[in-house]
Image: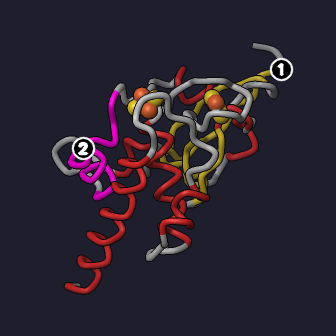
Amino acid sequence: MANEKTIALDINGRRETVSVPAHRTLLETLRAMGHVEVKSGCEKGDCGACAVLVDGVAVDSCLTLAWTVEGRAITTVAGLGTADKPHPLQQAFAETGAAQCGYCTPGLIVAAQSLLNDDPDPGEDDIRLALSGNLCRCTGYTKVFEAVAQAARTMKEARGRS
Ligand code: FES
Ligand code: FES
């Protein structure tokens, strides 16, 4: 189609090509490519449901134009772990009851991973601040903060064993 450009996106360790117009957001692009684990909420940067990691840092994919992240490492929640081999954050969210309807969960886990990439041993205030851009209508947040602290402990113990 005219005014579209074919770009290569590195998504969860796999290179995929897609044709996008200049105005297409990363959120729209990922979901159209089948990455529906990336959730669409407000589409204006308020809720954090659409967060993905770009080079290890959480961004709101609804505010990011797809072409601007060509060649950068994009990680969705599905790239962190699977049902068979969950990431410690995914395990902790399940064990603590931090996911209820689950719609906010992919974005929360991505935001938490971004924090842990930057600070593997965060305090509660650090966790609260890092997740302050993610809205959840169900949990009241307490279990979410517990889950992130639990995952941080699990990951610290794993590092201690390696
Ligand atoms: S959908 Fe992107 S911040 Fe709400
Ligand atoms: S678990 Fe339902 S919105 Fe967060």
Q: Amino acid at mark 2?
A: Ala
Tell me the CA gap for discs 2 and 1: 44 Å
- Counting from the top left corner in percent of width and height, residue 13 is at 43, 51
- Counting from the top left corner in percent of width and height, residue 121 is at 44, 76
Q: Residue furthest top?
A: 1
Residue plotted at (73% across, 38% down): 64
Vertical relation: 161 (above or below) 41: below
Tell me the element at label 1: loop
Q: Of 21 and 53, which appears nearest the observer?
A: 53
Q: Amino acid at mark 1?
A: Asn
Q: Is residue 103 visible?
A: no
In screen coordinates, is 78 left or right of 25? left
**Residue range (magenta):** 88-100
Ligand 1 is found in the corner quadrant, namely top right
In screen coordinates, is 117 left or right of 93? right
Residue plotted at (45% across, 25% down): 36
- Counting from the top left corner in percent of width and height, residue 21 is at 77, 23
In screen coordinates, is 122 left or right of 101? right
Q: Which residue is mark 1?
A: 3
Q: Which residue is mark 2?
A: 94
Residue plotted at (62% across, 54% down): 72
Where does the N terminus fall, quadrant-wise? Answer: top right
